[in-house]
Image: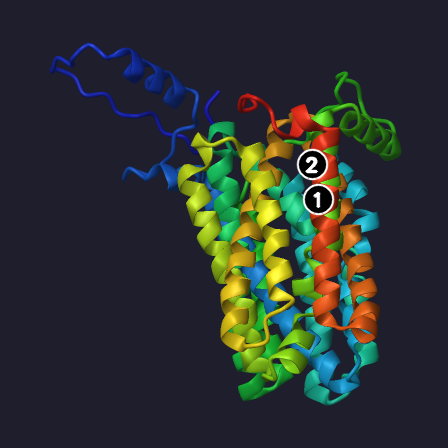
Amino acid sequence: MLPADALPVPQRSGKAFPRPTRMAAKEAETHARTPASPVTMPLPAALAPFRVRSFRFQWPADLLTSWAFEMEILILGWYVLVETGSVPLLTLYASLLYLGTLVAPMIGVIGDRVGHRVVLFGTRALYMVIAAIIMTLAFTGNLSPVYVFITAAFTGLVRPSDIGVRSALVAATMPLNYLVSAMSISRITADSARAMGALAGAGLFAALGMGPAYVAIVVFYAAGALLLLGSGPENAQASPDGTVRASPWRDLTLGIAYIWNSPRLLAGMALAFLVNLCAFPLVAGVLPYVAKDIFGTDQTGFGYLVASVAAGAVAGSIVLTIVGERMRVERIMVASMIGWYAMLLVFGQVETMTAGLITLFAIGTTQSVSMVALAVVLLRNSEPQYRGRVMGVRMLAIYGNPVGMLAAGVLIETIGYPATALLYGGVGLVFTALIILRWRTAVLPGRPAGI
């Protein structure tokens, strides 16, 4: 049954059409299974997800929320570093943003039960309220690192689930043959926001101060929540056996068992935990330290470093949007993860701003490609009624991030950043190889997984 926003393709009459070839017939059959769209102008294949009305609302909602995320992380991370002068406290702030990884699977259960759009609307309304509190404290001159840590802890309870829930919402409203393009565009949204949000946040913070910068953040969160009202329609999934769900904990148990008995999903979770433990912390968590103490730059230079990562990520996602559907996604995932660790080894040894920007661009490219490919592998190999829980458990893998960042903060002060980068990159490469050997046929199948 076609969705409410679908319009039939008008048929021309009175003219004879040539007999379709076998390839044309196959393409027509594929198109017949794809929801039509009210968009009258033809779209390139890479932009096909915009034919779906829900995606046209969710995309700007995610974009504005991602802008607010990146502005907030840059502004508060720099504020904590300047006010405290402590790398461990900087990594503590970054770690608090991932506090909610432990409850992410249950948020996935809630999304499966009540709808992912409802969950996203509620969490983004919470971000808006917390940002408004920081804005008020900044304008009144009462802001201190203690308040930043407290608000980061509240935000961190739900923020780790945002990426997983928005991915589940895309999968719930998108034809699977559009999924690689849709996930790549979603990643472009987040990464372009990382570049522009970082630059905008650094510029507003340096020019106007924290209070005015936070006015923009509050507005972005509010718009990101309101635009979600146009996404959907989405129905909560029934339980696998068709009965009424009695317990969320029972749903969570079923979801974990489902992942445990699927080698491809289990291998994906292991790889996700590893990159969060060994790859993300050296860039996401301690980049303010690298900017200030290694490259000797200010908050504007820090913004350029963050923007370089994001620009590389955008480039990687664009390439994957164009060619991803024709490639073996599992192999793309593994190759890009290996490249990511290799670039981290290089980045740990560079000492100039120019070399750092180039290396961070490569890190952003490999990071984006690997994360998009991982999300596609998990969503393609999950049954619809389990997608929220699968992505919730995927977010649980982010728990490796605060652990890795806290350890990195101690190691950097003990053995220095270059040695820490060598250690993290080496451990990541070794354990990636072990995961591939353990689940060889699942991670590197002989042919692409069916859609």
- Measured along the vertical axis of the image, is residue 229 above or below residue 253? below
Where residue 97 appears, as percent x and y from the top left, is 75, 62
Dot 2 amino acid type: Gly
Q: Is residue 31 left or right of residue 250?
A: left
Hey, which quadrant is residue 110 in on the image?
Answer: top right
Residue 438 visible (yes or no): yes
Residue at the image position 78 percent from the left and 65 percent from the top: 408
Above or below residue 107? Residue 26 is above
Q: Is 270 situated above or below 96? A: above
Dot 1, crowdedness within 10 Å: few (<14), some or many (≥20)? Answer: many
Q: Residue at x 45, y 32 (%)?
A: 325
Mark 2 closeness class: few <14, some 14–19, many ≥20 residues within 10 Å:
many
| Numbered badge on residue 382 | none
**Quarter of the rendering containing residue 74:** bottom right
User: Which mark, residue 268?
Assistant: 2
| Residue 263 % position (x, y) | 73, 26
